[in-house]
Image (cartoon, rainbow, N blue to C red):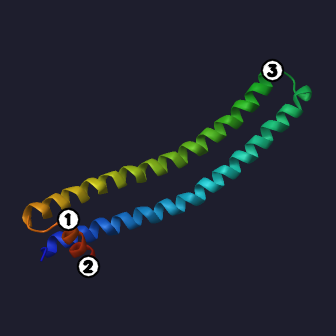
Amino acid sequence: MIEESLIESARSIKKEFNSLNDTLETYENDVRKLATHFLKISTELSDIGKNIDKMDTIEDIRDKVLQKLDELEAESDKICSKINNVNESIEKLKKEEMDLYNIIKKRYPSLSDDEIKIEVQRRI
């Protein structure tokens, strides 16, 4: 019923979405590692607080705390950047999907939304 080139576009969108979904699942592990890193830094900051009397100056304390916070920020920024890239790609796919839907709707005005959905799902 719906021409093959349009179905192929739907396949491509689905394939790309599945790939992005798999990528997000791998980032889940990165986020878990980041949480563990946060806990480690938290412990290190606590240790700095406990040993504050042994440090030379306020500047030494400040520098150590800022170094730990910079580590946290750098790791967090890496993960956020990866996730933001995937989110942007997903948004592009949503637009492509809507554009494809509109093309199908325009070429096959007699088909209902459910009929379009069933036909595309059946063929991809």
Q: Residue at x 34, y 65 (%)?
A: 16
Label 3 crowd bin: few (<14), some (14–19), many (20+), radius 10 Å: few
- Mark 2: which secondary structure? helix
Q: Read off the residue under disc 2.
A: 122
Give whichever of 56, 7 is nearer the camera: 7
Q: CA distance from mark 1 to mark 3?
A: 67 Å
Rendering quarter of residue 6:
bottom left
Q: Amino acid at mark 3?
A: Ile
Q: Amino acid at mark 1?
A: Asp
Q: Residue at x 75, y 41 (%)?
A: 42
Quarter of the rendering occupied by the C terminus: bottom left
Q: Amino acid at mark 2?
A: Arg
Quarter of the rendering occupied by the N terminus: bottom left
Q: Residue at x 21, y 75 (%)?
A: 119
Quick check: 17 above or below 36?
below
Q: Read off the residue under disc 1.
A: 113
Rendering quarter of residue 5:
bottom left
Mark 1–mark 3 contact, CB under 8 Å?
Answer: no
- Which of the numbered marks, if any, corresponds to residue 58? 3
